[in-house]
Image (cartoon, rainbow, N blue to C red):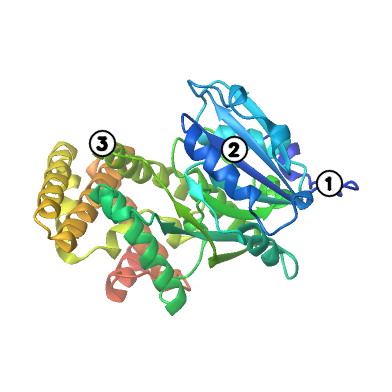
Amino acid sequence: MSVAPEESAKEAPPAAPGTPRISVVLATYNRLDLLQRLLGCLVDQTLSPTQFEVIVVDDGSKDPVRERIRPEQYPFRLTLITQGNAGPSAARHRGVLAATGEILVLLDDDMALPPCFLQTHLAYHEQGPPTAVIGRYASDPDIRKKPIFERYMGAKWDQLSIGVSSGAVIVDGTLLATGNASMRRDDYLRAGGLDVTLPRAEDMALGLQLEALGVRLVFSDSAYSVHLSDHTHPQTFRRRAFLHGQLETRIARLHPDMAHADPWRYAFSLPLAGRALCASVLLSPDLGDALAAAALVAARRADALGFERTALRATGLAWGIDYFRGMRTEAGSIRTMIGSAVTFLSKAAESKRTMRGVPVWLARAAGALQRPNGS
């Protein structure tokens, strides 16, 4: 993990007089305008500026933040840290190590915040057991102008909010997103911090570690931020899907008893037709690459014709196929991939939670195969 064992096990020392309650930690990279907007949102917070500090880690921006932002102009304590480009998880972790507050609030630099944002996060930590808060990503008011894959991601956050509110979605570590999350600093350290070796899914890995420690996980609509993502390249979207399939497979190995951490959970949540197309990747990752590319082209054409619902479904299919490609690449062979599916089904049979989309009879059959002598 990202910190030494002796560091990850220790708790944060008691706050000294005058120490802020909250440390807002964010990484930034070549997004000066969005960063300045976010800092402006932090100026407008209802929480007193004496109650929080802000730590910005510039992860090797071409236009260094230090040369454009003056910390003394802000009412809160602002710390700027500059490093060579090492990725967002390494930058966030460095910011956490420099933090002095009891509560961490992790943010992305492409967020806008309502004035009550920090006050809302803090309220979750004022009483009750140790808690990690997953704040909702609300869509940019101009999301209709964004590419179809950005609208797809916004729609998934909307669906998550509805699912949690209705009880259809159980909040667990897989949902943690460091673009808007808060937790106690000592819990972060006990969990080992963000794994700086992971280029994606490092927030999910942290979430599962927190869950394993017994930290209460909460999804909050009220602690929302507005996502102003500026991604415009479909290849970035596809690359993210692939990496999630690949890296979530590795992360799941650290939690063999958590069926909900297994990447096969996603495969079984797809509609039947989607499962069939994604399964084609088992036979040929190259075929899957072509299918995902075709699905995204179809999505963009459908969107241009005004069929947004169809376009969103095709975009979701492209994500699923690329996610499967990542799983297949990590598995290395069809045999290993099939074996991992049987293992997942076996875990699902033993899980106290119902795994969405998994037939009970199939899970039980897989469980019987996994038991010695089928007993």
- Which callout, 1 or 2, points at the residue further toward the start of the chain? 1
Graded by Cα atoms within 10 Å as few (under 14), some (14 to 19) or many (20 or more), the crowding at tag 2 reads many
| Frontmost residue, 64 versus 343 | 64
- Going 65% across and 48% down the picture, which residue do you hit? 43
Type of amino acid at the residue the image marks with label 2: Arg
Q: What secondary structure is marked by label 3?
A: helix
Q: What secondary structure is marked by label 1?
A: loop
Q: Label for residue 135? A: none
Q: How many callouts does the rendering have? A: 3
Type of amino acid at the residue the image marks with label 3: Gln
Graded by Cα atoms within 10 Å as few (under 14), some (14 to 19) or many (20 or more), the crowding at tag 3 reads few
- Going 27% across and 70% down the picture, which residue do you hit? 362
- Which callout, 1 or 3, points at the residue further toward the start of the chain? 1
Residue that lies at the very extreme toward the bottom in this rendered image: 166
- Camera sees residue 371: no
| Frontmost residue, 87 versus 221 | 221
- Going 53% across and 66% down the picture, which residue do you hit? 219
Cα distance between the residues tagged 1 and 2: 20 Å
Residue beneath disc 1: 19
Residue beneath disc 2: 92
Residue beneath disc 3: 235
Cα distance between the residues tagged 1 and 3: 44 Å
Q: Position of residue 337 (x, y in %)?
A: 28, 47
In the shown orientation, is residue 320 left or right of residue 135?
A: left
Residue that lies at the very extreme toward the front in this rendered image: 73
If the image is split into quadrants, where does the N terminus sit? top right
In the shown orientation, is residue 166 left or right of residue 357?
A: right
In the shown orientation, is residue 27 left or right of residue 232?
A: right
Give the label, 1 or 3, closer to the camera.
Answer: 1
